[in-house]
Amino acid sequence: MNIRLLAALAGTSVLLSACSLPLIGTSPTPSPTPRLSSTGRITIVQPADNTVVTTTTLHVDFQLTGAHIVNVTTKNVTPDTGHIHLSIDSLLISMNYQLSQDVSMQRYTPGPHVLQGEFVAADHLPFSPRVIAKVIIEYQPPGSS
């Protein structure tokens, strides 16, 4: 074989090998840390599933067992501390540090809506598996019937 051809092939091989090495000063992408599972269980006590809501304010009560609510945000999560995210129709409406809340229904259209409470860790991220309770409510604003 020709010496020039061998030199070119060797140079190309070195160049291709260098391209596959990570850049100096970079680190590999870390694997995601698995989320904790929670010891908590959440229930929506009020309103009950299939409740017809005829007022402009909805009172929501949760029951939390096996865990407790903390009103501090931290990256030091534990399986038994967190707070409640309240959503209606998959839209987060509050990050609650208590077991009850009044919600204005005035922005919602008449008809069915999904009310969801999720007990999340103190860093605002969900546990794995997620700790969720859902009920369906029927909103009939005052004067709509």
Image (cartoon, helix red, strand yellow):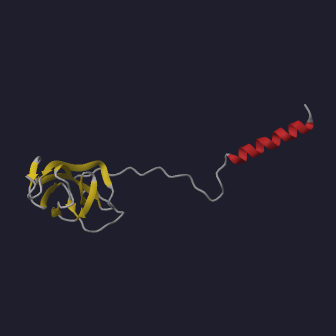
Q: Which residue appears at 9% of the width and 50% of the height?
A: 51
In the image, 76 versus 98, the foreground residue is: 98
- Quadrant assignment, res 70: bottom left
* Residue drawn at the location 72% of the way across and 48% of the way down: 18
Residue 112: give x, y in percent of width and height.
17, 48
- Residue 82 showing in the rendered view: no
Coordinates of residue 67 in the picture (x, y in percent): 20, 57
**Percent x, y of residue 122:** 30, 62
Foreground of the two, 102 or 117: 102
Q: Give the quarter of the image for residue 23.
A: bottom right
Is 73 displayed left or right of 8 in the figure?
left
Where residue 95 appears, x then y in whole percent?
26, 63
Residue 48, compared with residue 71, is above or below; it is above
Q: Choose between 118 and 105: the one closer to the eye.
A: 105
Which residue is most to the bottom?
Answer: 72
Query: Which quadrant: the N terminus?
Result: top right
Residue furthest to the top: 1
Residue sitting at x 33%, y 57%: 125
- Rendered image quadrant of residue 117: bottom left
Total numbered badges shown on the rendered structure: 0
Residue sitting nearer the eye, 140 or 5: 140
